[in-house]
Image (cartoon, rainbow, N blue to C red):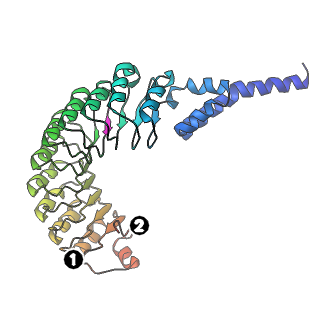
Amino acid sequence: MGESDDELVQQQVWSRETMPKVMKVISTRLRLPQRDLISLLLVSSSLHRTLVSSASLWLVLDFHEMNNAGDRLIAALALKRYYHLKQINLEFAQDIEDKHMAILRNQFAGSLQHLEHLNLNVCQKISDKGIEAITAACSSLKIFSIYWNVRVTDVGISHLVKNCKHIVDLNLSGCKGVSDKSLQMVADNYRYLDSLDITRCIKITDMGLQQIMTKCSGLKSLNLYALSSFTDEAYKKLSLLGNLRFLDLCGAQNLSDEGLFSIAKCKDLRILNLTWCVRVTDVGVIAIAKGCTSLEYLSLFGIVGVTDKCLEVLSEFCSNTITTLDVNGCIGIKKRSREELLQLFPYLRCFKVHS
């Protein structure tokens, strides 16, 4: 065999064996986007075979912001490489409807049996019927997000809790059709819930929120943004959440210092948004400073009842942890330069959250 023949053999080995293995490593380590992975399939038949044989590369389907998302999803699930799918992202996707959810249940339940994360944010054509269909096929689901959907009601949530027993992260933000009944079902079925977002779920009252805090005591993240109807009777139950790290109370108009006394018992709290909590004063913020000494993010934006006194106590107890602090609109707090604020909070990186 001549030298040219040897080179030809080496090129063939490189093309058929070495390059596919190299690209497989690169694709796995770099976590290439879905589109890039699909483009690589077209490079050569050997690379196609190598990549398709690696199940770990095909765990995610991402159609966010795409048109014809329903048909695209069905076409993708018809491919064997997606049989071990873990995540589907349809956030802001167009043309995804209840009928697509029904097809997924009826034809592709096998491909969805390992699905853990489903994002249906702003898929506004999905109703309770769609939720019933898709959850029936996804019994392993752990993370479910359906932000800004006004068609989903307590009926849809009843299907979710019936079919998906392992939810730990639930986003119902903007789902104005859900009520205390939904939170009662969530509390009864998801005792190990880690994260809950009920932003702008305006039908929920103290009663529903109290059920969550009483029965889901392991919560680490709770988003109550733009919910002004809750009272201190509910906020007092926040003291039961010993593992809480994130709490958004922006616009909590009924929250008083008494409520903050209970929140101050959440010793692991890292992020606290008190923007426009207009009844809060120095007394409550001082309690937070002394109780939540691991605080990294605090917004007091728009609170006129706080003064330099609370800032001094925050500096005393949280100066080594706070990296974000917004006191804009707090007319009782002296305006300080960046340098002056850094003297109080040496690790401060963000001085303004709201504009």
Residue drawn at the location 29% of the way across and 28% of the way down: 135
Q: Which residue is mark 2?
A: 349
Q: Which residue is mark 1?
A: 307
Q: Please report contact status of discs 1 and 2: CB closer than 8 Å, yes or no.
A: no
Question: Which is more toward the observer, 145 or 272?
Answer: 145
The secondary structure that most of the magenta stretch takes on is: strand
Question: Which is more toward the observer, 42 or 273?
Answer: 42
Query: In this picture, is 296 found above or below 327?
Result: above
Within the image, what quadrant is residue 73 found in? top left
**First of labels 1, 2 by sequence position:** 1
Q: Secondary structure at mark 2?
A: loop
Q: At which x and y percent is residue 239?
A: 15, 52
Q: Which segment is the magenta one?
A: 141-145
Query: In this picture, is 235 found above or below 65?
Result: below
Mark 1: amino acid: Thr
Q: Residues within 10 Å of mark 2 (few under 14, many from 20)?
A: few
